[in-house]
Image (cartoon, rainbow, N blue to C red):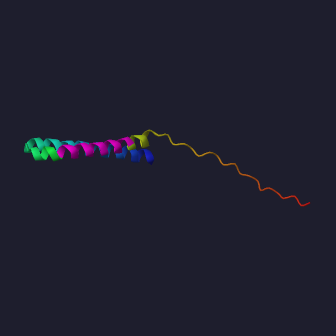
């Protein structure tokens, strides 16, 4: 389940990054306003950094191999010696 969740995180972060680039930069070019560009560019950079960290986390979840737990040996109860 961890790998599926990691893949979902990767896809979601990529989708958010693409949407942020479209709505953050392309719309600012369409509006052609310096105020939109001055506020939008740092916001776009910040969102892309967060998306990059999320994608990295998802990638680590996808590529990490699951380690089987070490086998537990059943120990026999120790008998006390009556002297």
Magenta segment's dominant SS is helix
Q: Nearer the viewer, residue 49 or 11?
A: 49
Left or right position of 3 against 81: left
Residue 64 visible from this viewpoint: yes
Query: Is 42 within the magenta?
Result: yes
Residue 67 against residue 76 in the figure, above or below: above
Q: How many marks?
A: 0
**Quadrant in the picture for residue 59:** top left
Residue drawn at x 62%, y 45% is 70
Residue 57 against residue 76 in the figure, above or below: above
Q: Which residues are magenta?
A: 40-56
Left or right position of 22 against 67: left
Residue drawn at x 76%, y 53% is 76
Left or right position of 71 against 37: right
Q: Position of residue 18 (x, y in %)?
A: 23, 42
Residue drawn at x 11%, y 47% is 35
Q: Position of residue 82 (x, y in %)?
A: 89, 61
């Amino acid at each position: 389940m961890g790998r599926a969740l990691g893949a979902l995180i990767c896809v979601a972060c990529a989708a958010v990054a693409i949407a942020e680039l479209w709505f953050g930069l392309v719309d600012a070019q369409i509006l052609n306003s310096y105020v939109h560009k001055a506020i939008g560019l740092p916001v776009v950079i910040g969102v892309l950094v967060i998306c990059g960290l999320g994608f990295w986390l998802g990638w680590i979840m996808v590529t990490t191999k699951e380690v089987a737990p070490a086998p537990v040996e059943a120990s026999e109860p120790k008998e006390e010696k009556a002297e």
